Amino acid sequence: MRTDIRPYQPDDLDGLHAALDQVAREGEHFLDFTSAPPLAALDAFYRSLAQSGWPHYVAVQGARVVGWVTAAPCPGQTRAHAATIGIGLLAEARGQGNGTRLLTAAIDHAWQIGLTRLELTVRIDNHRAIALYERLGFSTEGRMHHAMRSAAGHYTDAFLMALLAPERGLRIRL
Ligand SMILES: CC(C)(COP(=O)(O)OP(=O)(O)OC[C@H]1O[C@@H](n2cnc3c(N)ncnc32)[C@H](O)[C@@H]1OP(=O)(O)O)[C@@H](O)C(=O)NCCC(=O)NCCS
């Protein structure tokens, strides 16, 4: 089935909440949470993104939301140029280039509104996500030891990865 990538609309809230919850409930392998936040909290977060014009796209198959990407503000005046990426797709929508399309939309949008840094954390065993980020130019800036802990008490490391806007990123000389 054809998958379209388009900006999030308020009508997508229920469908996106369900998709987020489904991916979160796959376990502790992908996201920081194992169930979706309450609908009202998610709605408030998405409204704040929309009010500021920050990147928020969904992947849809007909009327069904099958994926999302957000770029959320990093708190603090000295971090106003930076955003944190969140991305996910239902299992049946993975491995078909949809993650590439979602993330590319968010990156283009981010540079257009003047952001100059996108960052994210990813479990070291999330190979598909890491492959996607590296292919789109993200570099690994560090390893966060014991960044995540499962309900059973098992720790996993995560990579901190980031992408700088092209006009800034390549001119830095240390
Ligand atoms: C991460 C995610 C968004 C990527 O989206 P996607 O549509 O599957 O990604 P794409 O198909 O665009 O690209 C994935 C790349 O990983 C590669 N890949 C797939 N499985 C892989 C694996 N097990 N190991 C390494 N690379 C893999 C693909 O070949 C592809 O690279 P290529 O296009 O150069 O061949 C998606 O898989 C997902 O939602 N995963 C669960 C939620 C999640 O992990 N979110 C990110 C948390 S940091």
Image: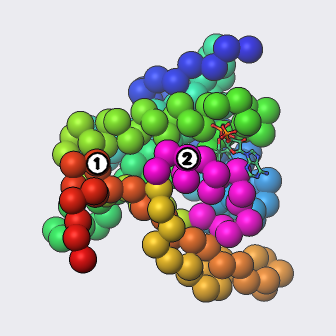
Verify whether residue 57 appears in magenta.
no
Pointer 2 residue Cβ closer than 8 Å to ligand 1: yes
Residue at (60% x, 47% y) in the render: 132
Spot the residue most to the left.
Answer: 77
Residue at (47% x, 56% y) in the render: 138
Residue 100 sits in quarter = top right
Q: Quadrant of the N terminus?
A: top right
Label disc, if present, on residue 41 of the rendered structure:
none
What whole-number distance in Å separates the C-alpha atoms at marks 1 and 2?
15 Å
- Above or below, 72 against 11 in this view is below
Q: Earlier in the sequence, mark 1 or mark 2?
A: 2
Residue at (57% x, 28% y) in the render: 59
**Who is closer to the viewer here, 39 or 64?**
64
Q: Quadrant of the C terminus?
A: bottom left
- Above or below, 130 against 12 in this view is below
Q: Quadrant holding ligand 1? A: top right
Residue 159 sits in quarter = bottom right
Spot the residue most to the right.
Answer: 152
Reading the image, the residue beneath label 2 is: 135
Give the percent coordinates (x, y) of residue 14: 58, 33
**Who is closer to the viewer here, 172 or 125?**
172
**Who is closer to the viewer here, 172 or 3?**
172
Residue at (31% x, 43% y) in the render: 110
Reading the image, the residue beneath label 1 is: 166
Within 10 Å of the Cα at label 1, are there few (<14), some (14-19), or many (20+) other Cα atoms?
few
Verify whether residue 130 appears in magenta.
yes
Q: Which residues are magenta?
A: 122-137
Give the percent coordinates (x, y) of residue 127: 72, 57
Residue 58 visible in image: yes
